[in-house]
Image (spheres, grey):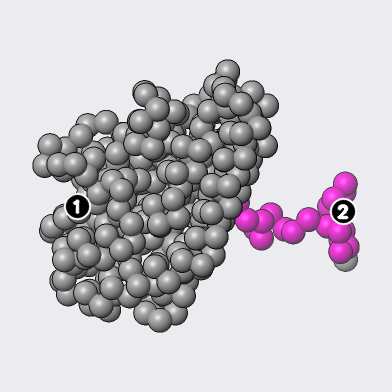
Amino acid sequence: MRTRPGRASGPDAPPPRAARRRPRRLPAVGALRPGLLARLTVVGALVLGGSMTAAVGPSATAATRPPVDYVALGDSYASGWGAGRGIPSGGDCGRSANAYGRLWAETHPTSSFRNVTCKGATTRSVRDRQLSALSVGTDMVTVTAGGNDVGFGTVMQACRNFVGDPTTIRAQCYAAIRDARYRIDHRLPGNLRAMFDGIAARTASPTRIYVLGYPRLFFETDYCGFFGMPGDVRHDLNLTANYLDNQIRQATESANARHPERFVFVDVRQRFAPHGLCAPDEWLLPFQGSLSDAVTTSYHPNARGQRYGYLASLNAFTG
């Protein structure tokens, strides 16, 4: 067989010129179909923006879905107590326009939005005073509750300040932590079950119920200010918050087993982790005001925590 001089032959020879495949040229951006360009733009924005983009405005999915009847339930973490922009109609419940429920309703299609959240609420008071807002026409429910059932505010009050006798304060602090853990183990599961079953009973089977947990309170660092708690105490408070969240997660999963495809646990801990108290950019309010204020707005999410911690976590599930 004759070959051209200088051209390789045999199994290692390149393919004939006619058989070579030219690389496919991509069309210019302006030549893309408008619908495809829009979809690519949304995908690129989500990749580049990440969770913060999800928190700022509605996604493409949210903008095109039908409107929902949405009801927000829960305690001060759900009402936005301490996050600013208080709502006068909220009365003594400490409702804020910066609360994650209100922010979700403002950035997603809703046919109705009822916010019955209230600071100080327990799972029992949610059942007694808030569930009347639900109906078989409710499409979506959010709820954050359980912290007041176990006395987490009392724990923070007992552990907040080590300026006095550190031995006495440490003893009081760890007594409160032990009591909270006992309640988490022995009281909270039944309380959550009753609340979840009450929500399910008042709504129809397609209703999706999002249970949002609580953040870890502290960014663990060596120094947290002159009036800050010792590092080991902050660490143990974080462990207790984790313990509470894990119990709420288990109760949510059990509720979903009883009421299939209705309950979803929304874990906010990962988003809050770099932004706890003592972090350079805190998403929680530190202890502030007089001693009587220690269990009010202190240790609650600020406006950034509600938007970039809670709302962004919820948007990860709802779009």
Label annotation for residue 291: none
| Chain part drawn in magenta | 2-27
The answer to whether the residue labelled 1 contacts the one labelled 2, judged by CB atoms less than 8 Å apart, is no
- SS at badge 2: loop
Badge 2 crowding class, 10 Å Cα cut-off, few under 14, some 14 to 19, many 20 or more, is few
Percent position of residue 217, x then y: 51, 39
Which residue type does callout 1 highlight? Asn
Q: Quadrant of the C terminus?
A: bottom left
Disc ID at residue 115: 1
Q: Is residue 113 left or right of residue 249?
A: left
Image-quadrant location for residue 259: bottom left
In this orientation, does residue 288 appear? yes
**Is 220 in front, or is 14?**
220
Residue type beneath disc 2: Ala
- For image coordinates 25% across by 49% down, the residue present is 118
From the viewer's perspective, is 39 left or right of 248? Answer: left
Tell me residue 236's x, y (percent). Answer: 63, 44
- Residue 108's place in the image compared with 256, above or below, is above
**Where does label 2 land, which residue?**
8
Relative to 82, 18 lies left or right: right
Relative height, residue 247 to residue 179 (above, below): below
Cα–Cα span, label 1 and label 2:
78 Å
Query: Where does the image place residue 196, in percent across and percent down from the top left?
Result: 34, 70
Q: In the shown orientation, is residue 184 left or right of residue 90?
A: right
| Comes first in the chain, label 1 or label 2 | 2
Extreme residue in the top direction:
226
User: Residue at image x 45%, y 64%?
Assistant: 188
Of residues 259 and 184, the one drawn nearer to the viewer in this rendering: 184
Q: Nearer the viewer, mark 1 or mark 2?
A: 1
Residue 58 in view (yes/no): no
Which quarter of the rendered picture does the N terminus lie within? bottom right
Residue 111: image quadrant is bottom left
